[in-house]
Amino acid sequence: MQEFHSREQFEEINRFLLSLLEESYIRPETKPLNRTLDKKEIHDIFFREQPPKTGKPLQAVLQDFKDRIYKYSVRTWHPLFLNQMFSGVPYPAVVGDLLASMMNTTLATWEAAPVATMIERNLARWMADTVGMAPGSSGIFVNGGSLSNLLALTVARNQKLGPGISQNGLKSHKQGVVFCSEAAHYSLLNAVNLLGIGIDNIVTVKTNSRGEMLVDDFAAKLKSLDASRRCFAAVATIGITVTGGIDPVSDILELCRERDIHLHVDAAFGGSMALSSRGKPYFSDIDQADSVTWDAHKWLYVPLTCSALLVPDTAVLKDSFSSNAHYLFHPQEENAPEATDDLGRYTIYCGKRFDSLKLWILWHTMGTDALQKWVDNRLDLTDEFFKLLDDHPD
């Protein structure tokens, strides 16, 4: 491991990093969004058959980063970057990401990360409260909304499709079926593939012009299922990828309760709207949902990735994912708060990064009022953009 041999060397690296951050954050519009190179050019600049046999000073490596990697990368923090559902991030969140890396702890066990565990569980509680889930709801942080959706459907499969599935598998149970809209996120296809349900057993429900689920079609397709198939989960989306549309959660919930179906709300994109009084009505009845996905790396501009899977009772996560790794996990002390339990019992992770820290630092730096203003501002921009499009003759 290359170490610093002098304070001067340490300060030189810090000055370099500071200059790079200044270049990124001070008047980023003065720099190009990206430097256009074709795939072959990028390949020829960066592809190497072998790793370096000998090292060189960190200063030289960082300069190489600036001259090549930084130079030819898309500047997602540029004001004209409009490509994906993420963008440049506020400086406090970057600091949080750096500090999480510096701490380099795993949140699998309380023993290794007692404070980080409490920060994560507390933040999940704030997020659950914000979207309007039932009091006491909380959750866990995961690497992206796709993984959150996978874990939510795992819980649904284990709880609704039949007893003993996590132990004995699917062979002795009815064929499981998942319902979602035609416009739902593609991660659901990967989830049923990984869960052994099969992509052919996703039933897609028709949508309106905004991509929002048509409840009458949902009801009709539920009724048409034959006795050998069991719908164990339905996914409603708040913030459809292409249109930003919102499924009618309350109506979907009513059908789910009639048939004991796990309702998962994929609010990865739209969850942050709950911070705004204008967005709050879209979360009506979400207090009765069985699980919710919310990505802080979208509207809250936290560095990728920072996603939460929220549930009314975290015991369902422990039931699905707790293992018998006695060498790692230790019994809870009597009367210890549930939030102090080993988080490795509640996820599929062993190495689990302290991703909640970047959101914790941002939330404490900005405050809820400022986060709400961000969301209101984005809704204002959306209204303005819609009007411009609506008024345009083409």
Image (cartoon, rainbow, N blue to C red):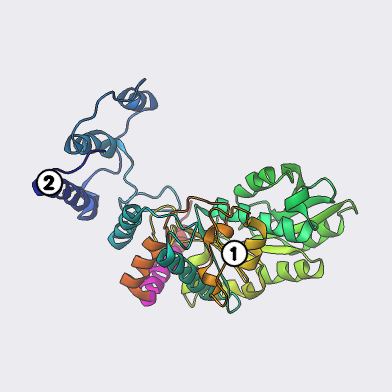
Magenta span includes 377: yes
Q: Position of residue 19 (x, y in %)?
A: 16, 49
Vertical position of residue 28 compared to residue 337: above or below = above
* Magenta part of the chain: 368-384
Numbered disc 2: secondary structure: helix
- In which quarter of the view is residue 267 placed? bottom right
Q: Position of residue 166 (x, y in %)?
A: 72, 52
Q: Residue at x 39, y 59 (%)?
A: 302
Name the mark nearer the viewer: 1 or 2: 2
Q: Crowding at label 2, few (<14), some or many (≥20) Cα neighbours within 10 Å?
A: few
Name the residue nearer the viewer: 116 or 156.
Answer: 116
What residue did someone put label 1 on?
Answer: 292
Vertical position of residue 386 compared to residue 131: above or below = above
The disc label shown at residue 12, or none: 2
259 displayed left or right of 363:
right
Q: Position of residue 268 (x, y in %)?
A: 53, 59
